Amino acid sequence: MRLHVINLERSPDRLAKFMAVNRLARVTVAKAIDGLTLDIVDLERQGLVSPGLVHPDFYTIGGVGLAMSHVALWNMASTRDEIVTIAEDDAIIHPGFDAIAPEVIATLPDDWDVILWGFNFDLFMCFEMLPGVSSCLAQFDQEKMRAGIEAFQQQTITPCAYPLTWAFGTLCYSVSPRGARALREACIPLRPIIADLPEAARAPPYLKHFRAVGIDNTMCAAYRNLNAYVCFPPLAVSKNETEVSTVRKP
């Protein structure tokens, strides 16, 4: 399975770290669209973003660049009519990924759209633990995960695919050609939306509405209307270090 890792050309250190941490058979560098080079008015003219998107309460210009990088790979999946697997350059991939991920995909129905191989650990994730019976609102320990990266990479993982309701983070996922078209239709134009996640009201911070501050939040609002899945336990994690993010600090 080829992994397309999104990396800013001006951040070779992040790419070098990704390559050192992840020993994967096939990796292609997907040159990220740099938010600093974007003409937001032109993007509005093309119908890719809506007015008011770049705002302190919503997207940074770096966030727009990252979103457009994901969209470019969705377009590739659709045009080439092939599954595309996408990772961001802070993703930490389990060494068994190349063998396990295709096996998990083989269990999905023919009309699957997207499967997340990982998700952010700082909030929560909602999936159908027992499809048609009960959902599961899962919370995680980000600090413990950060300290346990070596253990994650060494342990045996036998994951399954579960129907996804929503999750934060776009660190690593696969999208089918059908899913790529569905994601583009659901997310474009990027707009300053409030994602309605009613299940989140069951756990701290007891909120069910989240501002779309990045492409992952925008995708959150779409998953329940797609044939979306999540790999659990995950085959990818991220330390999610916002202080060194190229999105929050373009």
Image: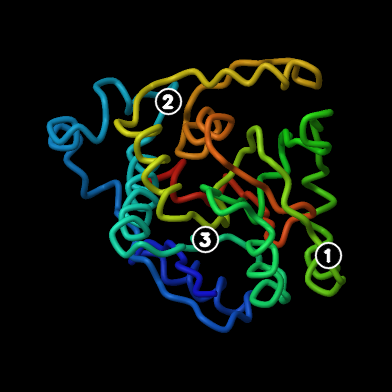
Q: Which residue is drawn at 83% across and 37% down?
A: 130
Residue 47, position as x, y percentages in the image: 19, 32
Q: Earlier in the sequence, mark 2 or mark 3?
A: 2
| SS under mark 2 | loop
| Residue at the image position 63 percent from the left and 21 percent from the top | 197
Secondary structure beneath label 1: loop
> How far apart are the two marked residues, 3 and 1, measured between alpha carbons?
21 Å
Q: Residues within 10 Å of mark 1 (few under 14, many from 20)?
A: few
The residue that label 3 is drawn on is 87
- C-alpha gap between disc 2 and disc 1: 37 Å
As helix, strand or loop, the secondary structure at mark 3 comes to strand
Pick out the residue farthest to the bottom. 25
Write down the residue under mark 1: 158
For label 3, count other residues whose C-alpha is less than 10 Å away and answer few (under 14), some (14-19) or many (20+): many
Mark 3 or 1: in front is 1
Name the image quarter holding residue 228: top right
Residues marked 3 and 1 touching at CB (< 8 Å): no
Percent coordinates x, y for residue 107 in the rendering: 69, 59
User: Residue 42, relative to residue 235: is it above or below?
Assistant: above
Name the side, left or right, on which 3 lies relative to 200. Answer: left
